[in-house]
Image (spheres, helix red, strand yellow):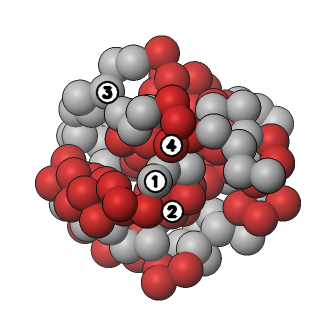
């Protein structure tokens, strides 16, 4: 068990973590964040973003949070995630083990959820 104590006890954070942890496994970390926000339209796009395969080597959950947010807030989400977790890149998180993947999912969903509802709306 990780030593990380998440600061996101929100319903959406816990929903995302539960989706990620469900067995049999249905969603990777990035998909779990998206589905917590009912963004099923992103499942295929995010299917290849788990396990350190998100662009730039980012944590998949962080990549999903950024994808769900207004571009103006992307840098702030990265900064806050790094402050909470210690790193933004999946490989660095796994090597230093400051938090487990479920913790990253909780954290990322919390940051995605801090955006205005307008930022999380589906884009047609």
The quarter of the picture where the N terminus appears is: top left
- Rendered residue at 63%/32% (across/down): 37
Query: Residue lying furthest left in this view?
Result: 83
Asked which quadrant contains residue 62, the reply is bottom left
In the figure, is residue 100 to the left or right of 25?
left
- Rendered residue at 28%/65% (across/down): 75
Q: Secondary structure at mark 2?
A: helix
Q: Secondary structure at mark 1?
A: loop
Q: Secondary structure at mark 4?
A: helix
Depth check, front residue: 20 or 64? 64
> Given contact means CB atoms under 8 Å apart, are the residues at marks 4 and 3 in contact?
no
Depth check, front residue: 118 or 92? 118
Nearer to us: label 1 or label 2:
1
Earlier in the chain: of badge 2 and badge 3, it is 3
Nearer to us: label 4 or label 2:
4
Query: Residue lying furthest bottom in this view?
Result: 56
Q: Which residue is mark 1?
A: 70
Depth check, front residue: 37 or 25? 37
Question: Local crowd at mark 2 within 10 Å, few (<14), some, or many (≥20)?
Answer: many
Q: Which residue is mark 3?
A: 8
Question: Local crowd at mark 1 within 10 Å, few (<14), some, or many (≥20)?
Answer: some
Q: Which residue is mark 2?
A: 63
Q: Is residue 61 visible?
A: no
- Rendered residue at 42%/33% (across/down): 116
Q: CA distance from mark 1 to mark 2?
A: 13 Å
What x and y, as percent, mark residue 98?
24, 54
Q: Which mark is residue 119?
A: 4
């Amino acid at each position: 068990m990780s030593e990380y104590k998440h600061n996101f006890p929100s319903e959406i954070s816990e929903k995302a973590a539960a989706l990620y942890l469900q067995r049999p496994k249905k969603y990777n970390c990035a998909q779990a964040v998206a589905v917590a926000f009912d963004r099923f339209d992103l499942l295929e796009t995010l299917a290849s973003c788990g396990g350190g395969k998100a662009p730039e080597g980012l944590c998949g959950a962080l990549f999903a949070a950024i994808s769900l947010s207004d571009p103006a807030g992307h840098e702030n989400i990265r900064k806050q995630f790094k402050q909470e977790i210690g790193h933004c890149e999946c490989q660095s998180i796994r090597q230093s083990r400051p938090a487990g993947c479920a913790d990253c999912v909780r954290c990322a969903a919390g940051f995605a959820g801090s955006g205005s509802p307008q930022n999380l709306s589906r884009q047609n």
